[in-house]
Amino acid sequence: MSDLNPNQPPPSEDAGSQALSEALRSSFAIVKIIMFVLVLLFLASGFFTVGPQEKAILLRLGKPVGEGEQALLGPGFHWAFPKPIDEALRIPFTSVLEADSSVGWMVSAEEHRQGVPPPQTGNSLDPASSSYSLSSDTNIVHIIAMMRYRVTDPIRFHLEISNAPVFVTNVLNNALLVTASHFTVDDILSRRAADFQKALIDRVEDLIKSENLGIELEQLTYDSAPPTYLKNKFDEVVGTTQKRDTSVKDAQAYATNTLAAARGTAATRLYMAESARSRVVHWVDAEAQTFLDVRAEYERDPSFYKRVRQEMALEGIYTNVTEKIFMPQGTHELRLNLGREPIGSSTNSVAQ
């Protein structure tokens, strides 16, 4: 075998292998760059935005990340592993949600909100267009309830319960029908409306707790109405009841005012009598004490006491009289001329 000349070009097979090798190296470099770009794109696809009226629950391999309020992602930019590792479940976020009952009323809840009047069905009910409830006295009454609630456990409410808002509506329907069956139609419409509302609220809260819905009741109101073909009769009963209540209130007010006036007069008379009694008692006590004092002085020296009393009496007499006549000591006769002297006698005496 002769020695190869290094200045000679390589054989054609060696040149092809070298070109293939260089091509492969270039391809691997391109593949690496592409894979790096793909990884960057993969990671970049994990960025997502939560709107201002939304919140998101991050699911990692189908399970929520965090518990309670910590599982909620607020508005703004967030990052998570792209699917299928992580998934961001966006939910509308409002402080208070609303639900309306779907049974017991003459029109739909939306029509009721818009003020659509109930259909006129004559002297009968049309189950295809209106719904109703039965009261405890087996009367027909229309009732619609509106509730406002707040989500306290978003994972339970949005993930563990299928179609939770519909479930809440069913809870409200159940409470409405059950509560209506424990009250008479007059109680629901007017007489015990506040008691009916309280019982309805208690029933809804019990169902929320027993079913663990993850919500909290904020407010519940209801509207009630008799069947349209009986509305005039119910209005007459309500009007008569109002007149009766007004008469009873007027009578109670009159009785209250009369009793108050009588009690005031009695209290005044009792006060005056007590004041008079107190004055008399004090006067009698003072007179009794004076009598005891006088008696003690009299018993010590009766003659001296008599002279003192005489002098006191004379002092009062001397003070009040205008003319005083003092009789000298000895036996004298005192005559008082109580009438005028006869005129004739005086003339005769002068003539003589």
Image (cartoon, rainbow, N blue to C red):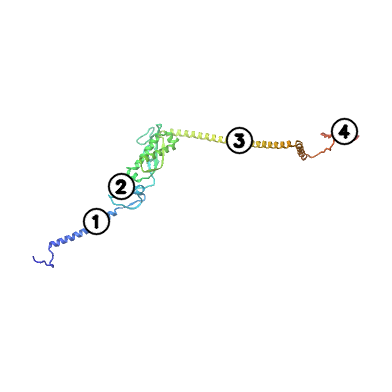
Q: Amino acid at mark 1?
A: Met
Nearer to us of marks 4 and 3 is: 3
Q: Which mark is residue 345?
A: 4
SS of the residue at dot 2?
A: strand
Kindly give the residue lying farthest to the right in the view shown: 352
The residue under label 3 is 270
SS of the residue at dot 3?
A: helix
Nearer to us of marks 2 and 1 is: 2
**Is residue 296 depicted above or below 95 in this figure?**
above
Q: Quadrant of residue 296?
A: top right
Q: In this rendering, does residue 292 appear at all?
A: yes
Mark 4 or mark 1: whose residue is earlier in sequence = 1
Kindly give the residue lying farthest to the top in the view shown: 137
Seen from the viewer's position, the closer of residues 198 and 250 is 198
Q: Amino acid at mark 4?
A: Ser
The residue under label 1 is 35
**Crowding near pointer 3: few (<14 within 10 Å), some, many (20+)?**
few
Seen from the viewer's position, the closer of residues 95 and 127 is 95
Q: Quadrant of residue 105?
A: top left
**Is residue 214 depicted above or below 49 in this figure?**
above
Gap between marks 2 and 3, in whole Å?
Answer: 83 Å
Q: Amino acid at mark 3?
A: Leu
Q: Position of residue 298 (x, y in %)?
A: 73, 36
Q: Position of residue 53 (x, y in %)?
A: 36, 49
Mark 3 or mark 1: whose residue is earlier in sequence = 1
Q: Amino acid at mark 2?
A: Lys
